[in-house]
Amino acid sequence: MSALDTSVDYLLYGSTTDKANAALYDAEVIQYFKEIETLPGEDKTALLRIIAFIRDTKTKQTYTR
């Protein structure tokens, strides 16, 4: 939507920050995620891989029960 200088996705769902704040109520966790955003690319990628590993492990545990 060039007339509004924003995307349809943003208009319908808000920003990713808005979504994160709505989903996360723990201020300390929110602060950690904000800090991750400021890390150098390689460090940020390493942390995101760890988070993905945790997610994948939990998914496997759910489906193997």
Image (cartoon, grey):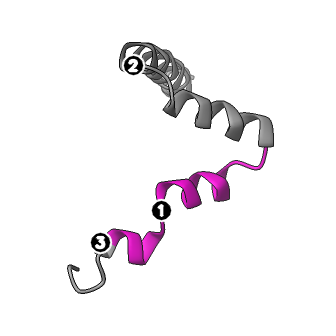
Q: Name the residue rendered at 45%, 70% in the picture.
A: 13
Residue that carries the numbered disc 1 in the rendered image: 15
Pointer 3: residues within 10 angstroms few (<14), some, or many (20+)? few
Circle nearer the N terminus (3, 2): 3
In depth, the one of 24 and 39 nearer the eye is 39
Q: Is residue 23 one of those drawn in magenta?
A: yes
Left or right for 32, reference 48: right
- Residue range corresponding to the magenta coloring: 9-26
Residue that carries the numbered disc 3 in the rendered image: 7
Q: Name the residue rendered at 60%, 30% in the picture.
A: 35
What's the residue type where badge 2 is placed?
Thr
Left or right for 65, reference 42: right
Q: Is residue 42 above or below residue 19?
A: above
Quadrant housing residue 42:
top left
Mark 2 element type: helix
Pointer 1: residues within 10 angstroms few (<14), some, or many (20+)? few
Circle nearer the N terminus (2, 1): 1
Please give the label number shown on residue 45: 2
What's the residue type where badge 3 is placed?
Ser
